[in-house]
Image (cartoon, grey):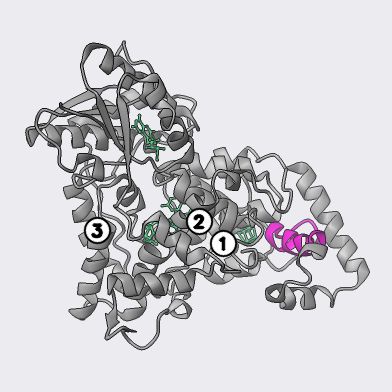
């Protein structure tokens, strides 16, 4: 008996488990649906990217001889959810088995667990083996550990994959070259940027649909330059390996006004929806090292992001859901300011990062962590609202990867699962790593006064506000030693300034 195989928008991989052993009698169902496109107000470019990539992938499957039932968003009979579309298809077609690779978000997995009861067919959920580690491997590793230190997980993944390993030892003698990933951009290397593609007819049709259908969603559709097929994504990645990887290590944490991407790969949207394979990418990067085309700090730094951080973050998500999404260790409840959506703020660093986000639905890690994330944490913005923002505005955002990065890493909302201390900094860090402060109306060095940099003021205010929570945290000892040098009058002035600034938000 043929099977119906449901393929989600972030499952565009020919080798995905739900397509293994497929026969030409089986039918693959793909659907553009309102529920997935609006459960948060996704950036217009994210929706366009995914719909276009889905349409291209379905065409590719058809060319390979598979039967694909593809439901377009504007199909007048579209019932608006994945389950309802499966149901509609089953009303006129006989299948007794529905096969799905587990989705990347808990809300959908939980929903699917109840489908069998309502659909007239059995539902088989298969594991998603596009990752290096299984859920069980992460749980086994995490069990009994006081602290889930990413570095130890990463070493395990290095051993498992054999990447940058020689006789069970790390190539170069060290596991991690993180300390060599922190240079500010010197300006003496030319920046190639990501490979850009001209929208074809399929993409143009999708762009029109998205413009007309999602007018209230954030973001600009033009210029649209994303890859929308696996072959384009592979070309974009090869371009990165050739042009940017050699400098990726040095400038991983750097930021520059007008150059939002520097030497980053801009491939997370491709890898997360299945157009690129993490193992193949790491092997390609490792090969560049052995050919002498990229230094070890770059190659190790890149591989660490993929087999270390990406896998670790996924492990945390599935180990701690569904409770994780509710966590708010510091009880941060302030309304998300409007400028997160508009970019209209006189803080230059924030306006640069948010405007890049509006335009491209992308920004790199330090922009997300140490600018928009840092501000949200320092200002005590509502954890759930901030997480929703990150989930909506980035083309690579799915809850499994967005949530632990935002709630855990950027906001310390999980009380120390992802990080042993909050990733906070005053404006001094932003000034060291970027040229934003030079053109800003605020003075990065000032803690108080009309020109005080909000990051600098709020950093000290945060330490005072959360003193009882953090003062015994060993990793915060230096920060509190510095705070303790302040007279009471200075502390009062900092708090007064912060109160006034936050009230205006
Ligand atoms: P590069 O710097 O070139 O890194 C290469 C690849 O490594 C990335 O493409 C990505 O696949 C992986 N990677 C790097 N860091 C991480 C990480 N911390 N977690 C998972 N994968 C990582 N990444 C997402 O893919 N989706 C998200 O929704 C997302 N939300 C984030 C929210 C916050 C608050 C923060 C601080 C980080 C978030 N990240 C997220 C991680 C990281 O910022 C992006 O993966 C990265 O910026 C993507 O750009 P890039 O492809 O140029 O990355
Ligand atoms: C993100 C997204 C969007 C915008 N639209 C669709 C869609 O119309 N159809 C679909 O199958 N998937 C879409 N997705 C991706 C899903 O939201 C994603 O598969 C789940 O969140 C699980 O990771
Ligand atoms: Fe940002 Fe402060 Fe620098 Fe302005 S001075 S760019 S607000 S860190």
Element at badge 1? loop
C-alpha distance separating marks 2 and 1: 8 Å
Disc number placed over residue 418 in the picture, else none: 1
Disc number placed over residue 316 in the picture, else none: 2
Where residue 4 sits in the image (x, y, percent)?
22, 28
Confirm if mark 3 falls within 8 A of ligand 1: no
C-alpha distance separating marks 3 and 1: 29 Å
Res. 420 image quadrant: bottom right
> In the rendered structure, which segment of residues is drawn in magenta?
447-466
C-alpha distance separating marks 2 and 3: 27 Å
Where residue 210 sits in the image (x, y, percent)?
36, 26
Q: Which of 96 and 70 is in front in this view?
A: 96
Relative side of 358 to 60, left or right: right
Confirm if mark 1 falls within 8 A of ligand 1: no
N-terminal of the pair, mark 3 or mark 1, is: 3
> Are the residues flagged by discs 2 and 1 in contact, CB closer than 8 Å?
yes
């Amino acid at each position: 008996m043929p099977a119906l195989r449901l393929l989600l928008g972030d499952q565009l991989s020919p080798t995905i488990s739900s397509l293994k052993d497929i026969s030409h009698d089986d039918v693959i169902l793909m659907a553009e649906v309102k529920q997935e496109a609006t459960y948060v107000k996704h950036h217009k470019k994210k929706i366009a990217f995914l719909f276009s990539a889905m349409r291209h992938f379905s065409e590719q499957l058809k060319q390979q001889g598979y039967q694909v039932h593809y439901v377009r968003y504007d199909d007048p009979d579209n019932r608006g959810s994945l389950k309802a579309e499966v149901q509609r298809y089953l009303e006129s077609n006989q299948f007794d088995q529905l096969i799905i690779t587990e989705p990347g978000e808990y809300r959908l997995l939980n929903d699917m667990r109840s489908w069998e009861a309502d659909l007239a067919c059995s539902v088989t959920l298969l594991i998603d083996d596009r990752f290096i580690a299984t859920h069980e491997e992460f749980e086994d590793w995490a069990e009994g550990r006081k602290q889930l230190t990413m570095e130890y997980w990463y070493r395990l993944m290095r051993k498992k994959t054999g990447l940058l390993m020689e006789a069970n030892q790390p190539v170069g003698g060290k596991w991690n070259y993180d300390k060599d990933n922190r240079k500010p951009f010197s300006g003496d290397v030319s920046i190639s940027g990501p490979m850009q593609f001209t929208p074809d007819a399929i993409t143009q049709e999708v762009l029109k649909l998205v413009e007309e259908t999602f007018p209230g969603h954030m973001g600009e559709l033009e210029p649209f330059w994303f890859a929308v097929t696996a072959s384009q994504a592979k070309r974009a990645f090869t371009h990165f390996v050739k042009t940017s990887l050699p400098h990726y290590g040095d400038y991983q944490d750097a930021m520059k006004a007008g150059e939002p991407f520097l030497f980053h790969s801009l491939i997370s949207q491709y890898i997360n929806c299945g157009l690129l394979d993490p193992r193949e990418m790491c092997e390609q990067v490792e090969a560049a090292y052995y050919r002498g085309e990229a230094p070890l700090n770059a190659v190790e730094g890149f591989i660490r992001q993929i087999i270390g951080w990406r896998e670790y973050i996924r492990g945390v998500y599935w180990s701690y859901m569904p409770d994780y999404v509710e966590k708010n260790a510091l009880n941060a409840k302030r309304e998300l300011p409007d400028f997160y959506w508009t970019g209209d703020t006189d803080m230059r660093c924030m306006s640069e990062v948010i405007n890049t986000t509006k335009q491209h639905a992308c920004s790199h890690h330090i922009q997300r962590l140490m600018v928009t994330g840092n501000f949200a944490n320092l200002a005590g913005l509502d954890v759930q609202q901030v997480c929703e923002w990150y989930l909506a505005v980035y083309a690579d955002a799915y809850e499994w990867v967005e949530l632990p990065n935002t709630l855990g890493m950027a906001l310390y909302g999980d009380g120390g699962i992802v990080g042993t201390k909050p990733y906070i900094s005053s404006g001094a860090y932003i000034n060291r790593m970027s040229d934003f402060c030079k053109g800003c109306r605020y003075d990065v060095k000032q803690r108080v006064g009309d020109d005080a940099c909000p990051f600098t003021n709020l950093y000290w205010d945060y330490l005072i506000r959360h003193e009882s929570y953090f003062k015994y945290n060993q990793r915060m000892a230096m920060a509190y030693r510095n705070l303790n040098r302040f007279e009471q009058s200075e502390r009062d002035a900092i708090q007064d300034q912060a109160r006034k600034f936050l009230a205006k938000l």
